[in-house]
């Protein structure tokens, strides 16, 4: 591994979990990653808005939902933005940074700084279906699935896309992402 057992233990000792929003009252940044249901996400942000500091950055990891709808009614909306990590996040380098109209320059800069700190490739995305990556991947997957329906082997499609220059084929990426 890249870490000694002592280093790994020191890192995991610094990680805590909670179901109490009040425990987040002094954090600098929260990244919400609940499932893609607007009502659930809005409820989470309502609680975060009540319990987090007014200057804490509040980010959603949504991959398809309109972040403007998630942020609706949030106090200090300038501190909100989308930070869309691709799955699996420990492997995928792209991080889409999706501001809403109210997102402050400082919040946007924080998103880019976090991306660099995590070794990600940040890209500012506009608000549209699937942002950038998933918008393209949706069509890519549709084309790959159409080839399978025509009898082309999944392994051949993946191999062709690797030969074309992709790090992995569409079905390999799906397997890796879960």
Image (tube, helix red, strand yellow):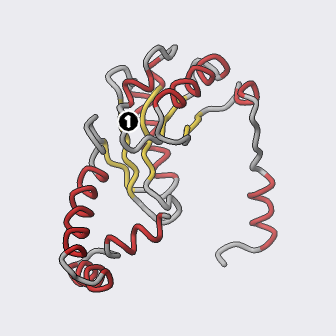
Label 1: how many residues lie within 10 Å, few (<14), some (14-19) or many (20+)? some
- The residue lying at 55 percent from left, 37 percent from top is 32
Residue wearing tag 1: 65
- Is the residue 178 above or below the residue 57 in the image? below
Task: Return the x and y of residue 9 as percentages of the image width and height.
Answer: 80, 63
Task: Return the x and y of residue 157 as percentages of the image width and height.
Answer: 25, 80
- Is the residue 15 above or below the residue 30 in the image? below
- The residue lying at 76 percent from left, 38 percent from top is 18
Task: Return the x and y of residue 10 as percentages of the image width and height.
Answer: 79, 59
In the picture, measured across the screen, residue 12 lies left or right of residue 175, that is right
**Residue toward you, 120 or 169:** 169
- The residue lying at 57 percent from left, 20 percent from top is 46
- Is the residue 150 above or below the residue 129 in the image? below
Task: Return the x and y of residue 62 as percentages of the image width and height.
Answer: 44, 40
* Secondary structure type for disc 1: loop
Q: Quadrant of the N terminus?
A: bottom right
């Amino acid at each position: 591994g890249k870490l000694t057992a002592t280093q790994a233990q020191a890192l995991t000792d610094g990680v805590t979990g909670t179901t109490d929003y009040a425990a987040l009252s002094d954090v600098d940044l929260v990244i919400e990653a609940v499932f893609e249901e607007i009502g659930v996400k809005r409820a989470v942000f309502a609680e975060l808005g009540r319990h987090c500091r007014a200057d804490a950055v509040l980010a959603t990891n949504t991959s398809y939902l309109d972040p403007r709808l998630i942020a609706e009614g949030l106090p200090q909306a300038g501190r909100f933005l989308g930070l869309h990590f691709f799955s699996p996040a420990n492997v995928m380098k792209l991080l889409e940074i999706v501001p809403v109209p109210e997102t402050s320059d400082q919040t946007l800069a924080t998103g880019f700084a976090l991306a660099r700190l995590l070794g990600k490739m940040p890209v500012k995305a506009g608000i549209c279906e699937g942002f950038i990556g998933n918008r393209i991947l949706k069509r890519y997957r549709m084309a790959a699935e159409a080839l399978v329906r025509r009898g082309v082997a999944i392994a051949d499609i993946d191999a062709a896309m690797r030969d074309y220059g992709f790090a992995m084929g569409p079905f390999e990426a799906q397997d890796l992402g879960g």
